[in-house]
């Protein structure tokens, strides 16, 4: 059946060999001359297909081109657009060798693991570059997305970072947390935008189904900030009633939030704050003795109420010196610096999320389940490309929305 389909496809494509006259525009302001008809074989979902198409050569640019290739979407690539999309989804879901096996078992398409890898990483690189280009246009107000319709009540951006195992070349000269002080990972920054319009029966906020859109990059925080800003604009950050940024307390997250969305409510993830409170109790354990559990329970209550002053006062009553005092100052500095972001009772009274579980789950599902499997060591370019494909899959509904012209408006 596949061979028959491939044969019929060859005959269909042969109806137009791509001859566009003796000369055509090469795309760089020169004229390319017709040379002859040349064969090109490329893989499709029906198997290999050979096409005889007109070939032109530009003396000025010293390169050749085939208009028919561009029309079919196979210019400079060995796969049809349909097979490329199929390959991208398989390679984004599982390791490359398994992806090749899936294509063979489910579609009868036989590709080597290396071809699957190269094609998927090429697609991911194009996707990442397109995201950066779109972000630059939106940030520069050269492309203005129309507000979502209907407009959600609340929009959230949850931001985090996670390490991805890298080759030694990618981590050379970088400090790490290992016993030898060498880095073995590079951080990928991840953001997830989602909306909320309702509370459940217990009064807890509920994320709107299908409202999540993801973006990730290995670039520095400044470049990531531009991506986050553009996605926020696209998702209607300037139009919703309530915009909220969720994070774990890392300074770079709040730097992005303050610079790009100064009007947003900033909330430190409650569960990270509780972990820091447990660490604080361990620091004071030698002073608290048998009262540690009781003291910790009282401080957790303080945290739930957003009483950061109460936590700090209860900790500073103990006279510490030297290293212990430094540890205490560091621990309390986390709470004091983030106090405005820890008004949990007030946040909850407004029906807001106080946890960044959406991005924590994204770090595990979008990044971890594909890029952090046992034995994996990536290049930055390769990991960035696959992360882009993973984000596209996780944001598929919003990718479809983005493609609808009525959701975009270009400035004059």
Image (cartoon, grey):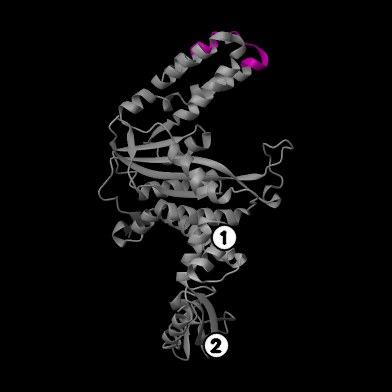
Please state if 36 lies on the left or on the right of 236 as rendered. Answer: right
Please identify the dominant SS of the magenta region: helix
Secondary structure of residue under mark 1: helix
Q: Quadrant of residue 322?
A: top right
Q: Mark 1 = which residue?
A: 98
Residue 323 lies in the magenta-colored region:
yes
Question: Which segment is the magenta one?
Answer: 313-325
Please state if 17 lies on the left or on the right of 183 as rendered. Answer: left
Q: Quadrant of residue 290?
A: top right
Residue at the spot 57% in from the left edge and 82% down from the top edge: 60
- Does 51 appear above or below 310? below
Q: Residue 316, percent across and down?
A: 54, 11
Q: Residue 52, percent across and down?
A: 51, 87
Q: Residue furthest left?
A: 150
Q: Does any portion of residue 409 appear in the rendered image?
A: yes
Crowd around label 1: few <14 · some 14–19 · many ≥20 (10 Å): some
Q: Mark 2 = which residue?
A: 38
Residue at the spot 41% in from the left edge and 21% down from the top edge: 304
Task: Tell me which numbered mark, 1 or 2, is placed earlier along the sequence.
Answer: 2
Q: Residue 155, percent across and down?
A: 34, 41
């Amino acid at each position: 059946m596949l061979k028959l389909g491939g044969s019929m496809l060859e005959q269909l494509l042969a109806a137009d060999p791509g001859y566009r006259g003796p000369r055509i525009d090469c795309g760089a302001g020169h004229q390319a001359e017709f040379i002859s008809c040349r064969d090109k074989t490329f893989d499709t979902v029906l198997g290999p297909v050979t096409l005889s198409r007109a070939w032109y050569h530009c003396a000025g640019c010293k390169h050749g081109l085939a208009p028919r290739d561009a029309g079919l979407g196979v210019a400079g690539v060995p796969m049809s657009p349909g097979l490329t999309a199929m390959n991208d989804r398989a390679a984004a879901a599982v390791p490359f060798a398994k992806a090749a096996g899936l294509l063979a078992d489910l579609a009868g398409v036989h590709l080597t693991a290396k071809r699957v890898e190269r094609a998927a990483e090429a697609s991911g690189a194009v996707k990442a570059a397109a995201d950066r280009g779109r972000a630059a246009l939106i940030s520069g107000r050269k492309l203005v997305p129309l507000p979502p319709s209907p407009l959600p009540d609340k929009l959230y951006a949850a931001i985090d970072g996670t390490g991805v195992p890298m080759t030694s070349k990618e981590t050379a000269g970088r400090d790490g947390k290992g016993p030898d002080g060498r880095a073995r990972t590079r951080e990928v920054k991840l953001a997830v935008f989602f909306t909320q319009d309702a509370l459940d029966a217990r009064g807890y906020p509920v994320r709107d189904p299908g409202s999540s859109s993801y973006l990730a990059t290995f670039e520095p925080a400044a470049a990531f900030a531009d991506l986050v800003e553009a996605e926020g604009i696209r998702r209607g950050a300037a139009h919703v009633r309530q915009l909220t940024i969720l994070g774990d307390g890392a300074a770079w997250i709040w730097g992005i939030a303050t610079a790009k969305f100064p009007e947003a409510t900033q909330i430190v993830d409650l569960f990270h704050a509780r972990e820091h409170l447990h660490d604080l109790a361990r620091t004071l354990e030698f002073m608290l003795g048998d009262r540690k559990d009781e003291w910790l329970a009282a401080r957790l209550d303080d945290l739930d109420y957003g009483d950061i002053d109460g936590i700090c006062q209860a900790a500073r009553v103990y006279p510490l010196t030297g290293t212990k005092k430094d540890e205490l100052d560091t621990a309390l500095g986390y709470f004091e610096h983030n106090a405005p972001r820890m008004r949990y009772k007030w946040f909850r009274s407004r029906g807001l999320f106080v946890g960044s579980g959406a991005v924590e789950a994204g770090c595990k599902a979008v990044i971890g389940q594909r890029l952090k499997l046992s034995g994996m060591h990536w290049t930055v370019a390769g990991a960035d490309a696959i992360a882009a494909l993973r984000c596209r899959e996780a944001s598929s509904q919003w990718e479809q929305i983005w493609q609808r012209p009525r959701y975009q408006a270009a400035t004059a």
